[in-house]
Image (cartoon, rainbow, N blue to C red):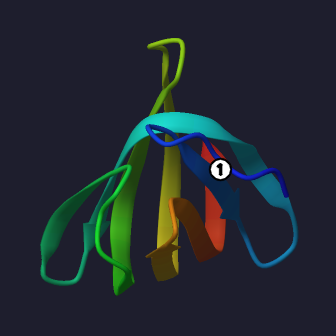
Amino acid sequence: MAEPGAHELQVSVVSADSEIWTGTAKQVVAKTTIGEIGLLAGHEPVLGILASGEVRITTTDGSVVTAKAEEGFLSMQNNVVTIVAGAAELL
């Protein structure tokens, strides 16, 4: 996996059986069991439990990719965001 730039996130959204989306982004917003979380480059490392809902990814060109994710977790460390869901699909 390529090293993301200083102001970019490297994002992977995967379900139990397939990769849903991978690329670079400026921002990721996801619903967790304690509320929504927004992630930008430089965010402290985090591990969260996903709640059923949308994951919104703002790519480096400004477009928004939206995925539906159910049950799983998200992690972020060193500008690498990984979202692993039991079920996920692009909307």
Closest to the observer: 88 or 7? Answer: 7
Q: Is residue 57 left or right of residue 39?
A: right
Q: Is residue 81 left or right of residue 4?
A: left
Closest to the observer: 65 or 4? Answer: 4
The image shows residue 67, relative to residue 53, as above or below, that is above
Q: Which residue is mark 1?
A: 89
The image shows residue 80, relative to residue 33, as above or below, that is above
Q: Position of residue 84 (x, y in %)?
A: 62, 75
Secondary structure of the residue carrying numbered label 1: strand
Task: Report the residue that reaches farthest toward the front.
Answer: 6
Q: Residue at x 85, y 58 (%)?
A: 1
Task: Report the residue that reaches farthest toward the left.
Answer: 35
Q: Residue at x 37, y 70 (%)?
A: 52
Three-letter code, disc 1: Glu
Q: Is residue 31 left or right of residue 5?
A: left
Closest to the observer: 75 or 16? Answer: 75
Q: Position of residue 15 (x, y in %)?
A: 72, 70
Q: Position of residue 6 (x, y in %)?
A: 49, 43
The image shows residue 5, relative to residue 34, as above or below, that is above
